[in-house]
Image (spheres, grey):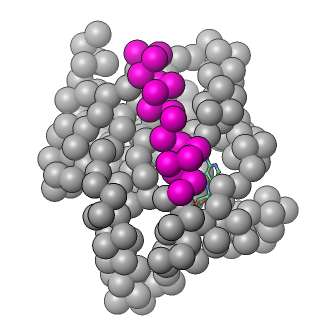
Amino acid sequence: MKLILLGPPGAGKGTQSQIIAEKHGIPQLSTGDMLRAAVKAGTPVGLKAKEIMAAGGLVSDEIVVGIIADRISEPDCARGFILDGFPRTLPQAAALDALLTSKSLKLDRVVELKVDDTILVSRIETRAKETLAAGGTVRADDNADALKTRLMAYYRETSPLTGYYFAHGLLKTVDGMAPIADVTRQIDGVLGEVQNA
Ligand code: ADP
């Protein structure tokens, strides 16, 4: 099962990919998580990405494509994977296609989590508050200014991907405004179609 979850920041991609990854025994590949780990570890990629991420901008296609190319070549990806936060631009989508074709692999589905913009700001604020209350560190980009930039990057660079994957016959849209368990059920429904195909 090779799956992409698409949606704006705060749509619930991370939450849903974790649940589905566990259920299906396949890894969740979050470029956001991988980049945050690189920033924390102070690797060359992390040093390049740090400021861009904190401001809410997009890290270069070259960097994220390199990260994903390495990651999907690892043995735990042999049975499939869920991409969360990648691709985020049309060139990244084209690079992913080329990568998969070179391995004779194909995407099964692209699931778009559709949400109202108005809820995104409050979801991100809630996430920051909950992280603080739990004694954690709030993400550098979970603040109003960076969120505005992240949303603009989403609409400018990422939202065209829904058209791209629709044209490839891969897109399924689910209602991301529903409670978490309902969203999971909707995604399971989409994945059931793939397994039964
Ligand atoms: P969000 O919750 O906003 O969807 P992520 O955790 O997926 O955030 O990503 C956080 C940040 O990491 C992004 O705002 C961006 O700076 C960087 N990033 C993650 N994935 C990509 C990507 N595929 N291309 C470019 N930048 C990325």
Q: Is residue 52 above or below residue 23?
A: below
Percent coordinates x, y for residue 65 in the rendering: 71, 40
Name the foreground residue: 188 vs 76.
188
Residue 70 horizontal/vertical position (percent): 72, 39
Q: Is residue 79 visible?
A: no
Q: Position of residue 175 (x, y in %)?
A: 22, 43
Q: Nearer the viewer, residue 20 or 109?
A: 109
Task: Indicate the quadrant containing the C terminus: top left, top right, bottom left or bottom right.
Answer: top left
Nearer to the camera, 140 or 1: 140
Compared to 141, does 119 lie above or below? above
Magenta span:
152-169
Q: Position of residue 82 (x, y in %)?
A: 46, 38
Q: Is residue 188 above or below residue 10?
A: above
Instruction: Tell me, yes or no, if residue 168 can be seen here.
Output: yes
Reply yes or no: does residue 159 show up in magenta: yes
Res 71 quadrant in image: top right
Q: Nearer the viewer, residue 9 or 159?
A: 159
Left or right side of 100 for 147: left
Question: Could you tell me what secondary structure mostly forms the magenta stretch?
Answer: helix
Task: Report the side of 15 relative to 193 (left or right).
Answer: right
Quadrant for residue 189, please give it. top left
Residue under the point 33% across and 58% down:
117
Does 149 lie within the magenta span? no
| Image quadrant where residue 135 sits | bottom left
Point 40% across, 79% down: residue: 128
- Left or right of residue 186: residue 84: right
Q: Tell me the quarter of the image containing the N terminus.
A: top left
Q: Quadrant of ligand 1?
A: bottom right
Q: Residue at x 70, y 55 (%)?
A: 59
Residue positioned 32% across, 44% down in the render: 113
